[in-house]
Image: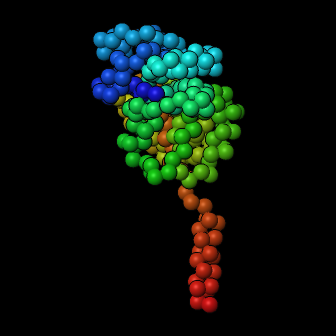
Amino acid sequence: MVATPIGNLEDLSPRAARLLGEVALIAAEDTRHTAGLLRHLGLSVPMLSLHEHNEAARVEQLDARLAAGEALALVSDAGTPLISDPGFVLVRELRARGRRVVPVPGPCALVAALSAAGLPTDRFAFQGFLPAKGAGRRGRLETLAAREETLVFYESPHRIRDTLADLATVMGDRRVVLARELTKTFETFLDGSAEALLARMEVDPDQARGEFVVMVAGAPPRQEDEAAVVEGEALLAALLAE
Ligand code: SAM
């Protein structure tokens, strides 16, 4: 499972580059996209497409090659395979068959975004992509509104404004950090309430272009939880005294 760059090609690890040149076959989300990376590396390695529509059907084929002693790599278009990308069915099936599956770690947009956002990272909940339609998206956000850990979403430029508008409706003026175009020329971090970020995009529409990781501060701890803790501590003190 080989992680590849999310923008800056220098982020490909030497180990990933070496392994991509050593394997017998690279299973790639989009072989045309990965051909560009291989060209950059000066490699010519056979490829096979593996995407959400053919993943289950590829399992037998790839398993047979592993059984024959070949080493294979899986890559997605960008970042770490399986993270909002294909590969889960393949890995589950290969592991069930006792095959060795190893990570070759590297870029991952959500981790890169969290590492530079200045939001708490001791606990976070990665939520992938929100539902595409408004009602579904707001419903999902409502189920998450009370969560106290940092929330992390992936978002496309087509929906970023709608998502910010729904965040403003459901989460109010909670702090949002938008990490845009990570590792690329126009990398930007925007920080503020969802409403303030929307206003910023009105003034500067370029801020709505590119790829986004949306991070939302967790809900403040609930009052009743604090009350329960105080009550629990009082009870514990009384029991200890006994
Ligand atoms: N597997 C990838 C990873 O490890 O991050 C994620 C793949 S997912 C299909 C693509 C989404 O990841 C984009 O819509 C965006 O939300 C996020 N993303 C990928 N590259 C990014 C970048 N350079 N800057 C910001 N977000 C990025």
Residue at x 40% of width, y 33% of height: 105
Q: Position of residue 208 (x, y in %)?
A: 46, 26
In terms of depth relative to the viewer, which is nearer, 54 or 199?
Answer: 54
Q: Which of 132 and 242 is in front in this view?
A: 242
Q: Which residue lies furthest to the bottom in this view?
A: 242
Q: Name the residue located 62 percent from the left edge and 45 percent from the top edge.
A: 144
Q: How is the image coloured?
A: rainbow
Residue 225's place in the image compared with 214, above or below, is below
Residue 14 higher or lower than 169, as above or below: above
Q: Which residue is drawn at 61% across and 32% down?
A: 96
Q: Is residue 153 above or below residue 20?
A: below
Name which residue lies at 56% across and 60% down.
221
Query: Seen in the image, is 201 located left or right of residue 62?
Result: left
Percent coordinates x, y for residue 15 in the rendering: 32, 28
Q: Can residue 164 be seen in this view?
A: no
Report the front residue among 113 and 92.
92
The answer to which image quadrant residue 229 occupies is bottom right
| Quadrant occupied by the C terminus | bottom right
Badge count: 0
Residue 171 coordinates in the image, percent (x, y): 59, 46
The percent position of residue 99, horizontal first and vertical second, equals 53, 29
